[in-house]
Amino acid sequence: MFGIARKFPGDPWAELLYNLERRMGRVFPEPYGAFNWQFGDVATAAWTPVVDIFEETGHLRIVAEIPGVKPEAVKILVENNLLTIQGIKEQLAEQKAEKVHRYERTYGVFERSFTLPATVDATNIKASYEVGVLTLILPKVEMAKPREIKLEVVPEKKLKA
């Protein structure tokens, strides 16, 4: 096998960068190949809302950002211990603009799924929506809630001498 030599007349930095790139290519042949990027069923989704998940004493709380989504366009499903948030963000056509210079906002279908732990009571999940933020309250089953056990003090027995 023949190697290709590159000449960089008058630019030692270009040659240095080229050699560095070749060496890095040998060490890391496929960029990001070792990482397991898990996005679930994102292939059909146009965008994925970001979420925060908090564990509190009696419940879990999921807060998802879905700005510009109408509440009636959101579905929350629970099936076989899988909580799914799905919906659609519709793009509003701009009537006044002659030219569109850039579209950066995301539109279309979205979906996020979460496997529920056994400690969640899936029958009593509550959802609220305010100013583009969806909040889900997932109560814990009674057995999973922390409880205090009362300490019983036993009287001390007197030792016989």
Image (cartoon, rainbow, N blue to C red):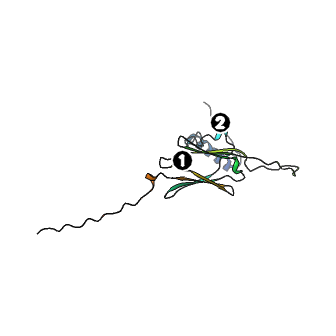
Alpha-carbon neighbours of circle 1 within 10 Å: few (<14), some, or many (≥20)?
Answer: few
**Position in image of residue 155 (x %, y %):** 24, 67
148 to the left or right of 97: left
Which quadrant holds the C terminus? bottom left
Mark whose residue sits in front, 1 or 2: 1
**Position in image of residue 98 (x %, y %):** 88, 50
Q: Nearer the viewer, residue 135 or 149?
A: 149
Q: Nearer the viewer, residue 32 or 55?
A: 55
Label annotation for residue 140 = none
Q: Nearer the viewer, residue 124 or 140?
A: 124
Q: Nearer the viewer, residue 35 or 135?
A: 135
**Position in image of residue 106 (x %, y %):** 72, 48
Query: Distance between the Cα atoms at labels 1 and 2?
Result: 66 Å
Determine the residue positioned at 59% across, 41% down: 40
Which residue is identified by label 2?
4
Q: Earlier in the sequence, mark 1 or mark 2?
A: 2
Give amino acid for label 1: Thr
Determine the residue positioned at 61% across, 42% down: 22
Name the residue furthest front: 123
Give amino acid for label 2: Ile
Q: Are marks 1 and 2 in contact (CB under 8 Å)?
A: no
Name the residue furthest left: 161
Label annotation for residue 123 = 1
Determine the residue positioned at 52% across, 46% down: 116
Examine the image and state in which quarter residue 7 appears.
top right
Secondary structure at numbered mark 1: helix
Alpha-carbon neighbours of circle 2 within 10 Å: few (<14), some, or many (≥20)?
Answer: few
**Position in image of residue 132 (x %, y %):** 68, 55
Which quadrant holds the N terminus? top right
Secondary structure at numbered mark 2: loop
